[in-house]
Image (cartoon, helix red, strand yellow):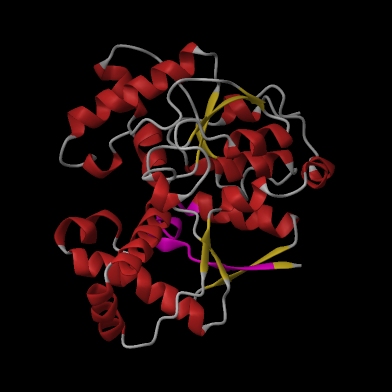
Amino acid sequence: MTRYGYYPGCSLHSTGAEYDHSFKAVCNSFKIELEEVPGWVCCGTSPAHASSHLLATALPIKNLALAEYAGINELVVPCAACFSRFKMSLRELSENEKLSEEIKEIIGSAFQNKVKIIHPLEVFDKMEEKNIKDAVKKNLSGMKVVCYYGCLLTRPPKVMQFDNVEYPMSMDRVMQKCGATVLDWSYKTDCCGATFSLTETDAVLKLTNKILENAKAVGANAIAVACPLCHANLDTRQAEIEEKYQTQYGLPILYFTQIMGLALGIEPKELGMKKHLVPTEPVLAAVK
């Protein structure tokens, strides 16, 4: 049994609940134990970052201090925005001794920076190909997927140290090991404008339309994502985009953990397939 600490963040306990459910279900299949950080708090993501640099740095460190106290050595952070804020905060502390002392005083406990932050893609990408293929129970070859990483997982590269900044492949490899047909495309790391969802909606619609347009053009029948914000823009805005640009996409947006779960034979209901606004039945029909 492999054991990791788990920081779900606010999204995975609310709008991105299907990410939480499918990740836990897949981990259970591979006998990976997740221990949620006791007493965790919101990491602040975009709101704190936009209003207070000190607060935006203190909140992730507070969570890491709680993880340390719980004896956690490796902390899995599935939300791309949380993952980014955790790594950015650690970088800030390493470069600013005064800030580091301020943060320690704010959180009220000693922080020794002993917890390694990892993303679920790193957990599954390092698994032996044979172990994943042996666990696969369903044929996903009819599922033509493009992998969308968004802009938070890989940038800035010196801070994130995640995959290749220009052309990441970890999600592609995981999807291929699960048997999905993974397509090449040009929008893997383009921004969907998630943090401007409410303030610059027209810009977000334009950016998101380009992503959907290219996915459709290369023949995808689904987009795999690893970020609740990206999922929200691509799934919940798709009808609005189709109306604005007079087109028809009908592209289901699935968390990569949901696709893994389908390959492992986990029931679609358990993976939260009914929570999507774009119907998922067309891709579910391709699962044999």
Q: Position of residue 239 (x, y in %)?
A: 34, 25
Q: Pick the quarter of the image with the N terminus.
A: bottom right
Q: Pick the quarter of the image with the C terminus.
A: top right
Up-down: is 123 above or below 210? below
* Residue range corresponding to the magenta coloring: 3-17
Is residue 15 in view? no
Q: Is residue 54 left or right of residue 6?
A: left
In this orientation, which residue lies closer to the viewer: 38 or 185? Answer: 185
Q: Position of residue 130 (x, y in %)?
A: 83, 43
Q: Is residue 159 left or right of residue 105?
A: right
Up-down: is 141 above or below 22? above
The structure residue drawn at horizontal position 16% and vertical position 35%, both measured from the top left corner, is 200
Picture quadrant where residue 29 is located: bottom right
Q: Position of residue 71 (x, y in %)?
A: 57, 81
Is residue 198 in view? yes
In this orientation, which residue lies closer to the viewer: 153 or 271? Answer: 153
Up-down: is 224 above or below 128? above
The structure residue drawn at horizontal position 26% and vertical position 54%, both measured from the top left corner, is 46
